[in-house]
Image (tube, rainbow, N blue to C red):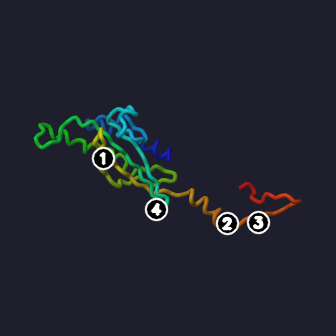
Amino acid sequence: MNTAIDKIMQRIENNSAAFTDKGFLAPQTIDTYQGQPTALDQFEFTLPAIFIDYMADYNSEKLYFYLHVLQDYAEDTENFAPDRANGMRFNEYLTTVKRLLNGMRIGGAFGALKLHQEVPVQTEFYYYHQITFACTLNNDLYAQTQKYIDATPVVPVLENGHLKDTMNGV
């Protein structure tokens, strides 16, 4: 899992121009999610920030990556705000993140990332969006252990009164 999260972080870091070319500040903090938006007294980070978490469903062989995208909303978005159009650019920032990662191939046991959902999140300190990407998970662990589960039971072999090793290095 560390490799997958690291590749997502690298993709964002290595493509800062996707943000700066649109006049945005590239993410200043990219980290694993540990509750940062809800516990400001325990963490230090600079906005904009992206925190990454995941959930694996081994039964359906799906993996979900949750990106908590926090921005500094400098402009107002009310109907009477003088620069409302500029305030609404937070959606463009989210779109940049989605375009950057949607379809990304992580490799190994993971399929390509596919945009799954986006939901707003409200904490005591922040209002932000959580973007979820899904991918298939090649459940190698299950396949590797299943061959032992399905194997014919091992019958102990005694040789000169001692148990003989019949596993042949397995």
Binning the other alpha carbons within 10 Å of mark 1 as few (below 14), some (14 to 19) or many (20 upward) gives some
The residue tagged 4 is: 60
Helix, strand or loop at label 2? It is loop
Residue 156, image x and y in percent?
A: 78, 63
Q: Mark 2 and 1 residues: CB-CB less than 8 Å, in contact?
A: no
Of 50 and 44, nearer the camera is: 44
The residue tagged 2 is: 151
Give the mark nearer the N terminus: 3 vs 4: 4
Residue 75, image x and y in percent?
A: 19, 36
Q: Is residue 39 left or right of residue 142?
A: left
Q: Is residue 40 left or right of residue 156?
A: left
Mark nearer the viewer, 2 or 1? 1
The residue tagged 1 is: 121
Q: Is residue 47 left or right of residue 112?
A: left
Of 39 and 170, nearer the camera is: 39
Q: CA distance from mark 3 to mark 2?
A: 12 Å
Residue at 42% across, 53% down: 64
Residue 18, image x and y in percent?
A: 32, 40
Q: CA distance from mark 3 to mark 1?
A: 57 Å
Residue 140, image x and y in percent?
A: 56, 57
Label number found at residue 155: 3
